[in-house]
Image (spheres, helix red, strand yellow):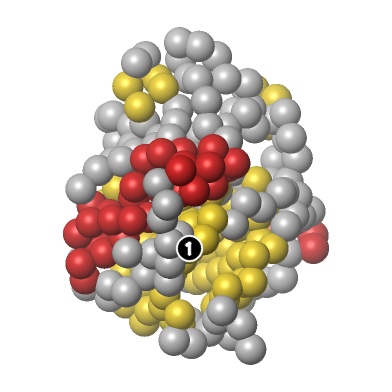
Amino acid sequence: MPGCEVTFVRTCTTIIRIGGRVVVTDPWFSMRMRFLPALVGPGVPLERVPVPEIVLCSHLHADHFEPAAIRRLAGPETVVVGPPGTAVALQGLGIERIVEMEPGGPAEIAGLTVIPCRVPHTFPPPEENGYVVAGGGFTLFFGGDGAYGAVYAEVGQRHEVDVALLPVGGSLVFGRRTVMGPAQAVQAAVDLGAKALIPLHPGGEWLPVPPLSWHPGRCRHAEAEARRRGLDLRVHVLQRGGTAVLP
Ligand SMILES: [Zn+2]
């Protein structure tokens, strides 16, 4: 019985099986990102995603939070977890179970332990949550598309993290890095004390428009960086639709 399975859909959209539950992170299945066309589609079509116990949302940017997809995914028992503002963003869609989380103590949700932390991203807010998710004796960290910061070492001191799901897109917005790049993702995984890293948010999914946004990151760069540093960190590079099985 594996500890955890992670299927990479696109961007930060994943399907996670942990502790006998299904968690879908940052759902975005559309072929549009606001007014921009998406350059690649989801690796798993929305209609093939199992009904999750939890939809876990890091923040409310359009390439991470698609209300129509959440409505389609959510069954009567599904809990949508997100930062402040999630309930308003889903208003009128008939979704009953919404939990807005601020950094703080753990919550038991649908049989899993979910612990939010604040990760740096854009300014001004929306705020972005990272999450520790534990179940079935396995612990993962989901970092959305956060930037690098002190928070990962803080989380690593408090929790034993088996696998870190971290972005590598390295978005530069007017010269400010709003998403960590591959080398920073490897460092954040080290800070977290993670045994494995699954790179997400590789960039290039929708039109990068320099200098508004530029995405130099690629998942293979994280793998190469971990090798270059001689780290005992397994980097699982997933194609869209690919699955990593973690012991
Ligand atoms: Zn974002």
Q: Is residue 145 above or below residue 123?
A: below
Q: From what the image shows, is residue 135 above or below residue 102?
A: below
Q: Quadrant of residue 173?
A: top left
Read off the residue under disc 1. 196
Which residue is rendered at x = 49% and y = 48% of the image? 227
- Rendered residue at 58%/73% (across/down): 246
Q: Is residue 185 visible?
A: no
SS at circle 1: strand
> In which quadrant is the N terminus drawn?
bottom right
Q: How many numbered discs?
A: 1
Quadrant, the C terminus: bottom right
How crowded is the residue under tag 1: few (<14 C-alpha within 10 Å), some, or many (20+)?
A: many
Q: Residue at x 43, y 67 (%)?
A: 195
Viewed as shown, does residue 97 lie left or right of 77? left
Q: Position of residue 153 (x, y in %)?
A: 23, 56
The percent coordinates of residue 111 (x first, y second) are: 46, 86
Residue type, label 1: Ala
**Quadrant housing residue 231:** bottom left
Q: x%, y% of residue 127?
A: 31, 43
Residue 240: x and y in percent read 72, 49
Residue at (48, 87) in percent of width and height: 136
